[in-house]
Amino acid sequence: MTFLRRLHLYLGCFFAPLLMFFSISGIWQVYGLQWVNGPNILTYLSTIHMGHNLFFKDPTKAYSFTSPYLEFFVVLMAASLVLSIILGVIMAFKFGRSTLALASLAAGTLIPLILIIVFAHKP
């Protein structure tokens, strides 16, 4: 179990900067903040997040940041996030209260599903 805790720790630390970028850029995209007051740094960073391109005022003149190396790194990050989450859940059951861990997992599953069902927009 010591190995799993270390793996969880170091995967989290290694991918933390990129996960923070994708998480924060996802937040400002949900609220459309990247378009406030015209093009700004958020607009440029959002284009990398959304389409692997960096647009400078004219979308027809884009600088592409797509590369097999970056794509591999992002896939590696996503797979490591999944592994780290699984390890975290295992550790929650092993070192925490099983009933509380189970209740947290259930709530984390049911609350978003309920919100989707209740607030779904029909076209």
Image (tube, rainbow, N blue to C red):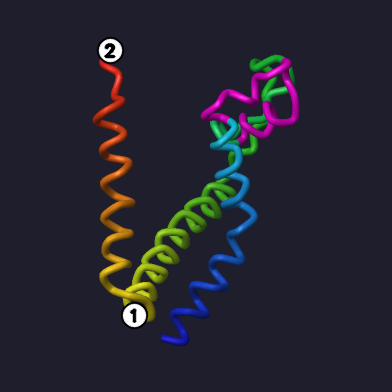
Q: CA distance from mark 2 to mark 1?
A: 45 Å
Q: Quick check: 91 above or below 43?
A: below
The residue tagged 2 is: 123
Q: Main secondary structure of the magenta part?
A: helix
Residue 123: percent from left, percent from top:
28, 12
User: In terms of image quadrants, where is residue 86?
Assistant: bottom left
* Amino acid at pointer 2: Pro
Q: Is residue 98 left or right of residue 2?
A: left
Q: Is residue 36 magenta?
A: yes
Tell whether position 41 is magenta.
yes
Residue 94 — which label? 1
User: Of 100 and 41, which appears nearest the observer?
Assistant: 100
Q: Position of residue 48 (x, y in %)?
A: 62, 35
Say how many tags the image has.
2
Q: Which residues are magenta?
A: 29-48
Name the mark nearer the viewer: 2 or 1. Answer: 1
Which residue lies at the image location 41% right of the left edge and 86% below the top edge? 1
Taking the spot 38% from the left edge, 80% from the top edge, the residue there is 95
Q: Does dot 2 land on a helix, a strand or a loop?
A: loop
